[in-house]
Image (cartoon, helix red, strand yellow):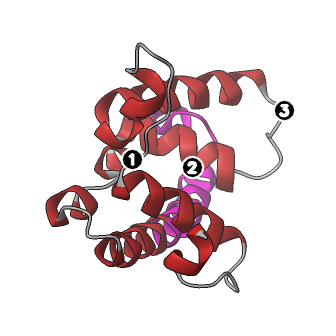
Amino acid sequence: MKYFEKIAGLSDWIHNRGEDWDQLKYLAEHKYNVYKAGKQLDAPTWDIVKHDWSKFKPSIWVPYREKFFGGNEENDPMIHKAFRNAVTEHARLERHHDYKYNNPTGEIMPNAENLADWYAVSKSKNSNIPNIKTWLK
């Protein structure tokens, strides 16, 4: 639950491994759902294979871990700031966020990877949602 591994004690380090495992399980399931949905939408294979790869960078991984799996620090301003910085870095590195961050017109024109990503996030919150083509309708 420490923000930076270098200042964590042994008990915090061990606890963080459990949080890392929880985050890894979530990210693996998310990537699988993006891949599966992306294939149904004919998204380019390489795009959906490398989807969210930047979330494995420590500068992104740790703030996401603390935000979503770190326990009761939800209102901690240090965690919030680190998380917002990680979100910005992730969006800068991942092309599937260009519609939001690098779009001068402000017009949202999603591609198959975007749709598969949104579907996978929805599926992680509700496993009973239908397949992506029904979901899109």
**Does residue 58 appear to the left or right of 24 in the view shown?**
left
Check the image and report above or below for 99 versus 120. Answer: above
Which numbered disc, 2 or 1, marks the residue closer to the eye?
A: 1
Q: Residue 75 bears which disc, if any?
A: 3
Which numbered disc, 1 or 3, marks the residue closer to the eye?
A: 1
* Kind of residue indicated by mark 2: Arg
- Badge 1, how many Cα within 10 Å: few under 14, some, many 20+? many
* Kind of residue indicated by mark 3: Asn
**Residue holding disc 1:** 55
Could you say where residue 8 lies in the image, as x and y percent from the top left? 56, 40
- SS for dot 1: helix
- SS for dot 2: helix
Q: Is residue 48 magenta?
A: no
For marks 2 and 1, the one nearer the N-term is 1
Question: Disc 2 to disc 3, how far (Cα)?
Answer: 15 Å
> Dividing the image into 4 quarters, which one contains the C terminus?
bottom right
Q: Residue lying furthest left in this view?
A: 46
Q: Is residue 15 magenta?
A: yes
**Residue holding disc 2:** 65
Span highlighted in magenta in the image: 1-26
Question: What is the chief secondary structure element of the magenta stretch?
Answer: helix
Q: Residue at x 35, y 56 (%)?
A: 113
Could you say where residue 100 lies in the image, as x and y percent from the top left? 48, 29
